Image (tube, coloured by chain):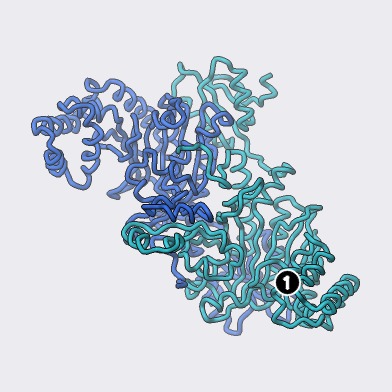
Chain colours: A blue, B cyan
Amino acid sequence: MYTTLPPTGMRDFLPREKEIREYVMREIRDEYKRSGFTEIETSFIENIENLTGGDGAENTKLIFKIMMRGDKLTKTFEKSKEADELAEYGLRFDLTLPLVRFYANNRNDLPTIFKALQMGTVFRAERAQKGRYRAFAQCDIDVIGDESNLAEIEIIQTISSTLKRLEFENFTIKINDRRILKAIVIASGFSEDDFSDIAITLDKLDKVGIDGIKSELLSKSYLEANVIKLIETSNHLAEFGLDGIKALSLEGYENISQIMSVITALEDGFKIEFDHTLVRGMGYYTSTIFEITYGDLGYSVAGGGRYDKMIGKISGIDVPAVGFSIGFERIVDLLLSENKMANTDVKIALLYDETQSLLDVIKKAMELRQSYAVVSLYKLKKKLGKQLVQLDKAGYDGFSIYGDEIIVKSFDQAE
Amino acid sequence: MYTTLPPTGMRDFLPREKEIREYVMREIRDEYKRSGFTEIETSFIENIENLTGGDGAENTKLIFKIMMRGDKLTKTFEKSKEADELAEYGLRFDLTLPLVRFYANNRNDLPTIFKALQMGTVFRAERAQKGRYRAFAQCDIDVIGDESNLAEIEIIQTISSTLKRLEFENFTIKINDRRILKAIVIASGFSEDDFSDIAITLDKLDKVGIDGIKSELLSKSYLEANVIKLIETSNHLAEFGLDGIKALSLEGYENISQIMSVITALEDGFKIEFDHTLVRGMGYYTSTIFEITYGDLGYSVAGGGRYDKMIGKISGIDVPAVGFSIGFERIVDLLLSENKMANTDVKIALLYDETQSLLDVIKKAMELRQSYAVVSLYKLKKKLGKQLVQLDKAGYDGFSIYGDEIIVKSFDQAE
């Protein structure tokens, strides 16, 4: 049955929404490029085995699967026991997995230290609910091939410039190191093998609080003594901050304190805070992790971390990497709610009546385009007042009636 | 099995390719917007019935189909007789069908005359071969709601400005009217019902020549007398041009001659030619059709036409519309082959050694970004010569060694 709505969880964007999205994309792209990030584009469609086989964790359950075609489909269907056997491709669910494949494929044509920028739509078949979309844009930057934390510092400085360019000023960078988290867990008596599982629980701190963490760990049958020690260590660190970590993880301490001292000294107008409770979900992070919160919002608008082992898993050769992703949809929502978009382009409607020479009218429009950003032609309607209201609503800043002496009037002047 | 290549017919884009694609997108977008076209975005994914039910002709055979999920998939699979029953969604194969759905859905929020711009990737499961891709970008502009040929004139003028902005100058616009084609067919003795079928054959003129047309029409069992008359009429028109059509189709004649006289008088540096053999494939065109050829290329780089009945088929209310699509991939190929991309951004690499203060180096980079478009940090390598060769290859225009007095050297100066 034909329907005029887009499919569940998918969106169309009207001109006003699209203008803001495009503006944000362009500002982010331009600012990232200024710091030497070069843009690439990867395929929307991946072979299904690439998507299901990797480190995608929960996301692998959310793949939109694309069917085989033709004879292959018919033959597979005849002998298939499960519908999933008919899937040949899938839509990408993030930009990291395609980037790693891209890098493995093109490494010889890329610089030793490759600073990549990617912007594009990703697809996840999430349960449909208000404010949750099944197709959304991501903006990622990654530094591949630099084992030093200059990579982290550059990424943080670049994202900071970008947020400032978009006129966000009240943001905070939270930073931690997976090695610090691991040291805390081990110092509390847990085994190293339990770290990943415990990290999954710790990641829920914002949602369930310290009591929730405690009861979940106990329900997973961890020793109560260890759980209590973990909470004590955490409280101790909350009191003593980064200095408290020196004895537990010297490399974590040195990494984080170096990043923080440079970023703080840049005095670029934002706060950077060590947060030993920061976990971030993805299993592939190996050391630095960071995220950005804005104002009093309860959620992060951007985040990332270092994943030094992921490329090696695919290509056989370990290559250090740090990645960072901006929550594009959240940035757009914030701009919409705060009405921050700076658009100084003047849009003019040039009105004419049918008795006038179309050629002369078009020439006039082309001439006006030397002075105004947008000049659009419309036939004069009988009810000029109504037409002007519509043009105002459509975002025009003024109008000109062809043949009149006054070239451009604002809508206020017209009243 | 994991593979580092993108799927068959899909592409990744390296920085240099992506830069050109992004440059072309931006130039086209900016120039279209200057003429009052407003950008929208439609969903990549459509309900499968919307894609298979419409006017898509051959394209409906090329849909990438997305499978149902969860319980729905399991239940449907158990009782399904054909694999196709498992498809719930599909990837869009053009931007016109989603635009028509979008318009039907949002009409009340759009201006009476809606000038739409859309740029995005479409997907067609074409047989894989060199130079043919299964995912490619399209750039469409459409004027919806204007029954006058100002719509055609504005579209042609805008596309002309755009091609000139991209520094293409040697292009020709070919124009025809479906009503003229139909009048020729009927005047040759065929019935009106045969028009669509005959048009499909006539569309092959470029490939098979006049003899090929003749034999195909005869093989379809049309009367030889009519076929001969059709060729005579065509020869007659080739001799007398647009004037020859006046008696056959006055409305076609008036439409085309008005468009041609305005476009010619604009003297905007390109040729417009009446071509009574122009057909263009899509069945939905109702009157004006046009396409653009560049230089001596044997193919069109852009094309479009008026489709006044398509929106009515969906929404029940006829709304006049004209659309135009640029063959984005061809434009990019041309720019690559002619090396036309004008990029004046100066890219600088700032080199430093590890003994220097990272903070000071980053401050210097931020300072240099006031003067240069791109400033990227790199650690000095032991083999400076080799490093400079790599930077040159990566597209940098010059470099600066932190602490040196000379701020920026071109690679020539360094030799």
Q: Label 1 amino acid?
A: Ala
- Relative image position of residue B122 (x, y in whole percent): 56, 56
Q: Position of residue A205 (x, y in %)?
A: 21, 42
Above or below A343: residue A311: above
Q: Position of residue A25 (x, y in %)?
A: 50, 50
Task: Say which of A203 and A284 sits in front.
Answer: A284
In which quarter of the view is residue B119 placed?
A: bottom right
* Crowding at mark 1 (Cα within 10 Å: few <14, some 14-19, many 20+): many
Is B189 left or right of A175, judged from the image as shown? right
For the C terminus of chain B, which image quadrant? Answer: top right
Seen in the picture, residue A303 relative to B208 is either above or below; the reply is: above
Residue beneath label 1, please?
Answer: B199
Residue at image point 25% right, 41% down: A203
> Measured from the top left, where is residue B118 in percent x and y?
57, 60
Q: Residue furthest right?
A: B239
Helix, strand or loop at disc 1? helix
Q: Do we see residue A17 in this rendering?
A: no
Task: Report the front residue among A54 and B293.
Answer: A54
Residue B292 left/right relative to A211 = right
Relative horizontal placement of residue B51, taking residue B276 as reference (left or right): left
Work out whether residue B138 or residue B196 is closer to the camera in this orientation and state it.
Answer: B196
